[in-house]
Image: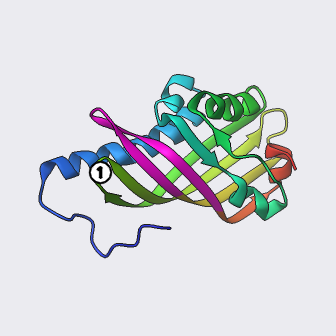
Amino acid sequence: MYVTDRRALSTSDVQELRDRAEILDALYRFALGQDLKDGALFASSFAADAELDFRPAASAWGAEPPVMTGRDAIVGIILGGFEGRVETTHQVTNPRVVIGDDTARLTALVEAQHLLTADRGTHALLKNLYDVELVRDGERWVMSRVVIENVWYTGDPEKIFGG
């Protein structure tokens, strides 16, 4: 499920280093696209038929959201649900990567701070573990499946995300 290899590189191949940078960049585009409310940047992190499963994270506070399927739906649901209502900041850390021929797997910790725009005292700070499957898209990589599991949270995620 998670990437737990005991070393970072399998070879000294320069292409592998480029791929690793592009794989990490897909998750960085996901995070920064949300924080900047930049739909094009956010969308660029996903394959057209991507799937995002936030259910494991949301179960920590009793919510049962559906799996989001398709880049356009993911962008619309996440950015649309926060538009004019929620400010976010994301930090990505501890990335681990395994690369196949045209697929890759990424594990990372992502800390996400969410504040209600109208009431900055209402917030949810989540530390989540991401399990990401990626596919090659030309010279870059895009996320084809993202599963987000909550490690811990503080605040009131129900007011940010709903019940």
Residue 130 position in % (x across, y down): 54, 57
x 36%, y 53%: residue = 104
x 40%, y 72%: residue = 4
- As helix, strand or loop, the secondary structure at mark 1 comes to helix
x 21%, y 51%: residue = 17
Along the line of sight, which residue is nearer the eye, 126 or 61?
Answer: 61
Above-or-below relation of 60 to 65: below
Is residue 129 visible to the viewer in this orientation of the structure? yes
Does 13 appear in magenta?
no
Residue 160 position in % (x across, y down): 80, 44
Residue range in magenta is 131-149
For label 1, the residue is 20
Residue 74 position in % (x across, y down): 63, 35
Q: Quadrant of residue 99?
A: bottom left
**Amino acid on which disc 1 is placed:** Arg
Residue 162 position in % (x across, y down): 85, 45
